[in-house]
Each structure stands twice: as C-alpha cells, then as structure tokens.
Image (cartoon, coloured by chain):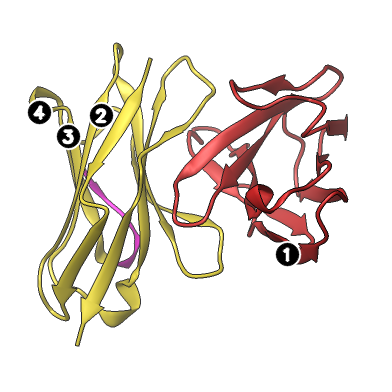
Chain colours: A yellow, B red
Amino acid sequence: AQSVTQLGSHVSVSEGALVLLRCNYSSSVPPYLFWYVQYPNQGLQLLLKYTSAATLVKGINGFEAEFKKSETSFHLTKPSAHMSDAAEYFCAVKGQGAQKLVFGQGTRLTINP
Amino acid sequence: SAVISQKPSRDICQRGTSLTIQCQVDSQVTMMFWYRQQPGQSLTLIATANQGSEATYESGFVIDKFPISRPNLTFSTLTVSNMSPEDSSIYLCSVYGTQRGDTEAFFGQGTRLTVV
C-alpha cells in the first residue's frame, strides 16, 4: 500500500528565500507522485507531477520537485519565495495500477515580509 | 483536464438535518471520488462512485451516513445525513483527467459545511 509523509506541518520562510517542502513516500511499485496547493477557501490545484519520465519535474509558479528513488523522496522547492506562495501544500501518491490517491498530512507555508 | 462544479460552495446547517452536495463534471468519467477535509487536516477519501453500481466506501465511512448517487457519467451527489458538529468539514469532489496521458486528479472548489 502507498503512503506519504510530509515532514513539517508548518514551514515559514522570508520573502525571496528558498522554499523546501519535504515529502517521502512508501510504495511497493514505482508510483505516480503529485504536489497540490490549496489556497485559502479554495479547492486543490495541481502544482506538478512525476510519472516516471524525467526525475526533475518543473511545475507552475516556479516550483519544481526531484524524484529520488534511493531516498524515496519527492521534495518540493522554489528558489525565491513570494508572498503569494502562502498556502497549504499536499504531497500525494498513486500506484500505477491503483485508483486511489493517498495524501500526506499537508504543510502550511507562511511567507514573512 | 476536467472542470468540476460543486454546489453549494458553503452552508451552515442545523444538527440532525441532512445536506446534499452536487458535483458536475464537464466530461464523462468512469469514477468520481468524494473526500472530506476536516479543519486543519488533510484529505480523506470517503468513497468512490461508479456509474451504474453502488459506491465503494473507505474504512470508517458508511452508506447510511454518506449516501452517494451516480445517475450518469458526469454527475454525482453526496449526502451528509443526520449531521452533527463533527461533520463540519470541507467536502471535495474529484475526478481523474480525461485527456490521453492524464494521471492527475482534478478537484472541485469544495463545499464548506458548518454544523451548528
């Protein structure tokens, strides 16, 4: 069965600083991995996804994530934080033959001016 | 991709009553998913709704409490029955993309339910 662990329920960075949100997964087969963002009072929006092509995945709003099989990680990064990045971020995993999407606990990103 | 319209966007309900949430998709999909997001928490899958068959519920969720209808390939409803304050959550509808190569899930804007 797949599972996802997000390290840090709350991350706070200064505007212009590096954003690093951590995600580790557990899967018995090569998975699909996703990062979603949820802005206040909104649904979930896909930031980026890994589907066994390139290990470095670029997404929207300047975010990217690197799939590292040896570390079972899929950490999300952005070189320079913007105030508009303040939101809740969810890492999710789905097995290639599975239908169910399993979410991590979420990380709330706060940007300090 | 898929565009999902969910109604209502929010509601405040009295305990003991029921609320039906509607989910409309702009394309035909085999499966529709209903999630609950309790305050400050992650998403938990309630059930998977297939057209023409009964919904499949996850552990901890039962049909009597969360009956689901799936009358066609673009529409589903979730009812939250006999509500209590513990049912106050965001309820989200989700489908997978219908384009070739789509692997990701798309979500409605959610229904923010407060039970008083």
Rendered view: B77 above or below B57: below
| Residue located farthest toward the bottom when viewing the structure as drawn | A113
Rendered view: A85 above or below B89: below
Q: Which residue is mark 2?
A: A25
The amino acid pointed to by label 3 is Ser
Do discs 1 and 2 share a chain? no
The amino acid pointed to by label 4 is Glu
Q: Position of residue A82 (x, y in %)?
A: 24, 78
Q: Which residue is mark 3?
A: A73
Crowdedness near tag 4: few (<14), some (14–19) or many (≥20) residues, C-alpha within 10 Å: few
Left or right: B54 as drawn, with respect to A15? right
Chain containing mark 2:
A
Residue that appears at 61% across and 40% down: B35
State yes or no: discs 4 and 3 in contact (Cβ < 8 Å): yes
> Which portion, as a residue range, is magenta?
A55-61
Q: Secondary structure at mark 4?
A: helix
